[in-house]
Amino acid sequence: MQVDTEAGEDVPISTTLTGALRDEAELADVLDRLYALGLPLISVEREEPDQSAPAGAASSREVDEPDQLT
């Protein structure tokens, strides 16, 4: 999961989480953690998977990645 923070003089601070999730249960877990932290959610956008990657290929999310939302 990649976390990017953006701020400007006329723009409020915003944080963007980007990464692949395996399924809806994993998405629900991320959303629950954000809610528990009291962070407002502005939007959720889905990107289509890369069609050029072979079937069964590993996603951009690394399996050994530490949990960044704890």
Image (cartoon, grey):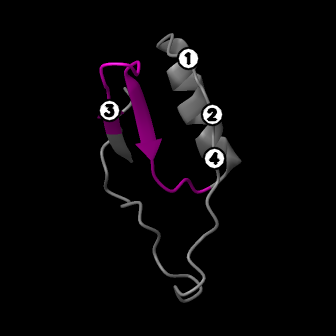
| Direction from residue 69 to residue 24 in the image, left or right | right
Question: Picture coordinates of residue 11 (x, y %)?
Answer: 40, 22
Residues drawn in magenta: 4-22
- Assign a secondary structure to mark 1: loop
**Contact, mark 1 vs mark 2 (Cβ under 8 Å):** no
Is residue 18 inside the magenta stretch? yes
- Assign a secondary structure to mark 4: loop
Q: Amino acid at mark 3?
A: Thr
Q: Which of the two labelled residues, at mark 3 and mark 2, occupies the earlier sequence position?
A: 3
Q: In the image as oriented, which residue stretches furthest toward the right?
A: 24
Indicate the quadrant where residue 48 lies.
Answer: bottom right
Indicate the quadrant where residue 56 lies.
Answer: bottom right
Q: Which of the two labelled residues, at mark 3 and mark 1, occupies the earlier sequence position?
A: 3
Circle 3 or circle 1, nearest the eye: 3
Residue position marked by numbered label 4 in the rendering: 45
Q: Amino acid at mark 1?
A: Pro
**Contact, mark 4 vs mark 2 (Cβ under 8 Å):** yes
Q: Residue at x 46, y 52 (%)?
A: 19
Question: Picture coordinates of residue 39 (x, y %)?
Answer: 50, 16
Frontmost residue, 67 versus 1: 1
Query: Which disc, if any, is residue 5?
Result: 3
| Crowdedness near tag 1: few (<14), some (14–19) or many (≥20) residues, C-alpha within 10 Å | few
CA gap, disc 4 to disc 3?
17 Å
Indicate the quadrant where residue 30 lies.
Answer: top right
CA gap, disc 3 to disc 2?
15 Å
Residue position marked by numbered label 2 in the rendering: 43
CA gap, disc 3 to disc 1?
14 Å
Q: Amino acid at mark 2?
A: Ser
- Assign a secondary structure to mark 2: loop
**Contact, mark 3 vs mark 2 (Cβ under 8 Å):** no
Q: Amino acid at mark 4?
A: Glu
| Crowdedness near tag 4: few (<14), some (14–19) or many (≥20) residues, C-alpha within 10 Å | few
